[in-house]
């Protein structure tokens, strides 16, 4: 899977004050040496690059690692930009290869120009995530740590950043590898007993194996139990606003965003499509979705909107059900309430500043959710809603501590499969099944957990993971 090509890519956002071009591989020093000139060299020839002075293209081979050089990037006889060059020689670099980073001025044209010059001189354009992929293939980080890199880049909150950093530090890998090594120890004992029954008594050891397997089952079960909590705090809470037409859903969306994002009119059914935005409540991230009013209609477009609202509702972590408290519950409300029976959420009794005709008891008789008196017009209840959401999700087993938890769906699936195999091992021991049955399921659990750190991952899986990375990382 290793690639000997020297790769290059833009490693910074375009249009900032500084643009960073990264190059990695065994020809990095040679390629950059061809196109870089020191200020001292430029001053000697007074801007004339061909009047008898010779540039040593081995400049970076002679420099100490982790040093900075100031100078210019040239293209033929022309100076392209004034730059700073950071040199990191193998193996003490991000990829464990020779790596050079060129800090240029951040204009998109000049950054792309320098990239083109490096490509012209023998480098290959890096694919998404290829620098991090090389760090993985060269053994500097495992697959779980590689995935943490993108989690750091995409983190939206302190919790997301904290969890990604812990994963990058190897907390998840070390924890999972500890479980794998204990499984390997049990496998080794069973194999030894089968080969040398005179010195190893499996009958006496079965109880120890059962205790060990029960411990692993508990550890993996705890990881899975905490997954949803960790995912929501890391990636955001998928929050869906539902209600019948003209209940005030879009007004609530605008209020939470503090901008006129959704169209609001007195005409029922204004929102016919899904509107998605991100809202921050202190350290809570809401992936907020405003949906079309749910009701029965013969309008084709409205029906499509209603169907989409129902689909988003099914996937929601949290629901804000907006009711119009100036009118009694009707058939549309009953339709919505039936969809909310197995969900988690809160009822906003909107329009509480008007002549109220709907009480909390009316809601409670149909849906056992907490209710908040609310008004989009006066903002009554807005702080209470914010506090309610924060109190609902800033608790539980996962906090800012040293606990290991999963936030990656790929890791969750691997743990689920490993857990199922270990349950099979436990059942086989209790049923007195032959040792072969134990080792097959135990080895399967060992391999499934190996998918997390990449030890047993296929090339196709590895390629798929890194294709989701951004360019230059």
Image (cartoon, rainbow, N blue to C red):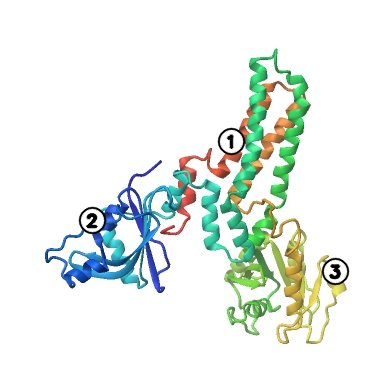
Q: Which residue is mark 3?
A: 364
> How far, Cα to Cα, is label 2 from label 3?
79 Å
Q: Which quadrant of the figure contains the C terminus?
A: bottom left
In the picture provided, is 421 more to the left or to the right than 83?
right
Helix, strand or loop at mark 2: loop
**Badge 2 vs badge 1, beta-carbon distance below 8 Å:** no
Q: Residue at x 82, y 83 (%)?
A: 356
Measured as percent of width and height from the top left, residue 63 is found at 32, 55
Q: Earlier in the sequence, mark 3 or mark 1?
A: 3
Compared across the picture, whether 432 is left or right of 102 comes to right
C-beta proximity under 8 Å, tags 3 and 1: no
The quarter holding residue 205 reads top right
Q: Earlier in the sequence, mark 2 or mark 3?
A: 2
The residue nearer to you, when weighing 345 against 42, is 42
Q: Nearer the viewer, mark 2 or mark 1?
A: 2
Circle on res. 57? 2
Which of the two marks, 2 or 3, is nearer to us in this view? Answer: 2
Q: Residues within 10 Å of mark 3 (few under 14, many from 20)?
A: few
Secondary structure state at the residue bearing disc 1: helix
Name which residue lies at 41% across and 62% down: 11
Question: What residue does disc 1 label?
Answer: 447
Q: Quadrant of residue 361?
A: bottom right
């Amino acid at each position: 899977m290793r690639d000997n090509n020297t790769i290059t890519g833009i490693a910074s956002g375009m249009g900032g004050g500084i643009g960073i071009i990264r190059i990695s591989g065994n020809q990095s020093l040679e390629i950059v040496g061809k196109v870089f000139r020191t200020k001292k060299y430029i001053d000697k020839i007074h801007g004339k690059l061909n009047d008898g002075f010779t540039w040593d293209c081995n400049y970076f081979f002679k420099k100490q690692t982790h040093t900075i050089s100031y100078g210019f990037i040239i293209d033929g006889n022309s100076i392209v930009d004034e730059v700073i060059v950071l040199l990191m020689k193998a193996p003490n670099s991000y990829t464990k290869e020779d790596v050079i980073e060129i800090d240029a001025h951040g204009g998109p044209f000049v950054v792309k120009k320098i990239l083109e010059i490096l490509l012209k001189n023998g480098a290959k354009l890096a694919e998404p995530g290829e620098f991090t992929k090389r760090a993985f293939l060269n053994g500097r980080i495992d697959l779980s740590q590689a995935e943490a890199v993108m989690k750091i880049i995409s983190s939206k909150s302190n919790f997301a950043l904290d969890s990604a950093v812990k994963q990058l530090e190897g907390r998840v890998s070390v924890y999972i590898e500890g479980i794998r090594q204990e499984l390997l120890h049990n496998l080794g004992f069973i194999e030894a007993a089968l080969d040398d029954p005179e010195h190893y008594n499996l009958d006496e050891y079965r109880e120890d194996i059962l205790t060990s397997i029960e411990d692993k089952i508990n550890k993996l079960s705890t990881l899975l139990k905490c997954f949803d909590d960790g995912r929501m705090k890391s990636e955001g809470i998928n929050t869906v606003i539902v209600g019948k037409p003209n209940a005030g859903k879009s007004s609530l969306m605008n209020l939470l965003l503090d901008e006129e994002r959704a169209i609001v009119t007195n005409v029922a059914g204004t929102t016919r499509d899904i509107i998605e935005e991100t809202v921050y409540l202190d350290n809570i991230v809401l992936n907020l979705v405003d949906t079309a009013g749910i009701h029965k209609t013969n309008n084709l477009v409205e029906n499509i909107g209603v169907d989409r609202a129902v689909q988003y509702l099914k996937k929601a972590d949290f629901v804000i059900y907006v009711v119009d408290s100036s009118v009694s519950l009707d058939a549309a409300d009953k339709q919505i309430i039936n969809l909310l029976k197995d969900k988690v959420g809160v009822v906003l009794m909107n329009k509480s500043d008007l002549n109220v005709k709907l009480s909390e008891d009316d809601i409670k008789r149909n849906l056992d959710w907490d209710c908040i008196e609310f008004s989009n017009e006066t903002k009554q209840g807005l702080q209470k809603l914010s506090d309610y959401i924060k109190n609902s999700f800033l608790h539980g087993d996962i906090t800012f501590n040293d606990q290991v938890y999963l936030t990656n769906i790929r890791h969750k699936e691997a743990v689920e499969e490993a857990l199922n195999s270990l349950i099979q091992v436990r059942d086989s021991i209790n049923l007195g099944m032959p040792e072969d049955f134990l080792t097959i399921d135990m080895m399967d659990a060992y391999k499934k957990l190996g998918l997390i750190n990449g030890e047993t991952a296929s090339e196709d899986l590895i390629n798929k993971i890194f294709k989701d990375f951004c360019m230059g990382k």
